[in-house]
Image (cartoon, grey):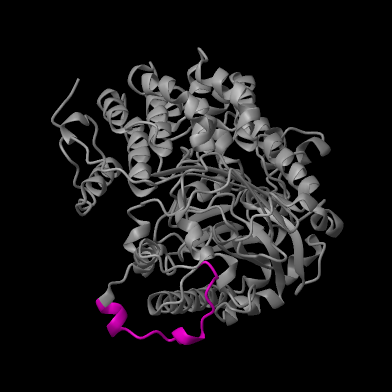
Amino acid sequence: MGKLWQERGMRPFTLILAILSCGMFTGFSQDRPNFVWILSEDNSKHYLRLFDPTGAPTPHIEEMAKDGLVFNHAFSNAPVCSVARTTLITSCYGPRIGTQFHRRSAMAPMPKGLKMFPAYLRAAGYHTTNRSKTDYNATPSDDVWDASSRQAHWRDREADQPFFHKRTYTTTHESSLHFSAESMAAEKTATDPASVVLAPYHPDTPTFRYTYARYHDRIQAVDRQVGEVLAELKEAGLLENTFVFYFGDHGGVLPRGKGYAYESGLHIPLVVRVPEKWKHLIAHKRGERLDGFVSFIDFGPTLLNLAGLPVPPQVDGRPFLGEGVTADDLASRDVAYGYADRFDEKIDFVRTVRKGSFKYVRSYWPFTFDGLQNDYRYKMLAYQEWRDLYKAGKLTEVQQQFFRPRSAEALYDLSRDPHETINLAGNRDLAETLSEMRELLNAWVTGMPDLSFYPESHLVANAMADPIAFGQARQSEIARLVELTDLQLLPYEDAAPGIEKAVASEKPWERYWGYIIASTHGPAAAGLSQRAQVAAQRDPEVAVRARAAEFLGLTMMADPRPGIMAALTDSPSEVATNEILNTAVLLKDGQPGYDLKVDESLVKHSNRYIDERLAYLAGRPAPPRGNTRKPTKTK
């Protein structure tokens, strides 16, 4: 990763300065390709006919493909906007640099010595424009964009100046499916709802069919917008001097897509139109479909490489087009990683690795189920109906999975089960594959190291001045926590000594994980009940108290409510309060279900997510966005 500068024998910044001093990047767009990125929000590859026969027709994107490359295996590393976009612009894994939470509680600094990749293009003479979404979780320097606004355009550059232009279309954004029952009854879709093919995990109802059809309509609208950009480039005489990328900013927005680390949340459409003038930079013929794996960490390095610029060594990605990238090299790439942490107020901790047709999913909080309340998700009628049908007992076994606890690890064979509904982790014939995938993922999270083995509240309070330095200084401790979580995968009798040692540890994060692991094993860990009751009231670390109470509630060993209320009363921050409330909602929505109305006078923190959680627990509508509760108790 980022080794091109070494092969050329110069550090990247030295090389850039040397080139600039020679004036090689002044004017002369004919000596440098242009780049245009067209992003459509909330689209996985499953909803475009070019990638899936059940998808919507997209004639302009399909025409692009005839003069370019179709990537069959392109991935966002995260299934939600701000995390995905930060990964894209930094070329770094979010859990390594502290940008993995949506929406951010604190901005992370860029890694030392690294800038967002458009800054390197700009330093080399490119005109860089963004129209217009940024949505980053890391702080950009002032030199990333020449212009970033709804009016930003490549036309505003100097004559013959090469350019990079990024354009985002919100046409397919999740909010486009926040329609009412009245509008569903009144507004017909161009796509016939009877013609759509539903995923097997979705119930076949008029609501779901209408939602699919409306989404297909929006995708076709995006396709027309792509056609307009291509026509604009052609009219300006720039099309055959410009690499045009079309891709989704992460997975699709239909339920179980955006916000979830399944293929429907991570597997994006990607088409790159290759200009006639620069086709010699590509090791493939125009019109080919490629099976090599690429992901968002690779996109920035690819543009730098196509522009003849070195790739900074601090990034995690590597180029997939341009000088030095052979057809065999790209074809050999068959691994992609994914991460899912906090999405608005809903918190989770999932890591994935896909290798070839196998997908391994590690749920570090497996007792958390996908369908946990998330205010923004449940604005969609399809989500609401899905949950209502589950509560009424009207779903199939596959359709119920979304509302049930998960396995700590899952293995899917996507060649036979593309919708990830059949967990093969217990298949003895695949034991070797399971072990290989588990080792791949463990090596990845340990090697970063993955900061999410600490709660977000701890990171915000202690790590955000320099997340990478924080992680590197604690790499051995994180490795120990990773090793500890493997106790989730053992029979309880084998795991028990390690769990008992963890909950008795002097180290708070070993105690924290000890109770999470105990919750994974459920009633089998009943012997820890007495210690957990003490911890829920007295542990010095509030996060441990909440996890101990969570264990008591999930296993029905004791009433979790006193521990939850005590943790809320002593919560040190808004972020910690939201973490505790996430547990409260889990205990309300899950089995056996608890009445967890909170005495709001005890909650001394308030923000949008806290107030949404409190409203949900109280059984009242969420407050309007922008209105926050005024806590009555302070310390």
Spot occupied by residue 295 in the image (x, y as percentages of width and height): 65, 53
Q: Hey, which quadrant is residue 69 in on the image? A: bottom right
Q: Could you tell me which quadrant the C terminus lies in?
A: top left
Spot occupied by residue 307 in the image (x, y as percentages of width and height): 70, 53
Q: Residue at x 54, y 64 (%)?
A: 398
Horizontal side, residue 463 vs residue 48: left or right: left
Question: In this view, which residue lies farthest toward the left?
Answer: 632
Assess whether residue 186 is covered by the magenta stretch: yes
Spot occupied by residue 172 in the image (x, y as percentages of width and height): 44, 68
Q: Can residue 161 be seen in this view?
A: no
Q: Could you tell me which quadrant the N terminus lies in?
A: top right
- Viewer-proximal residue, 191 or 391? 391
Horizontal side, residue 389 vs residue 224: left or right: left
Horizontal side, residue 271 vs residue 402: left or right: right
143 to 563, vertically: above or below:
below
584 to 268, vertically: above or below:
above
Q: Tell me which segment is drawn in magenta.
A: 182-201
542 to 120, vertically: above or below:
above
- Viewer-proximal residue, 357 or 190? 357
Q: Hey, which quadrant is residue 4 in on the image? A: top right
Q: Residue at x 24, y 32 (%)?
A: 605
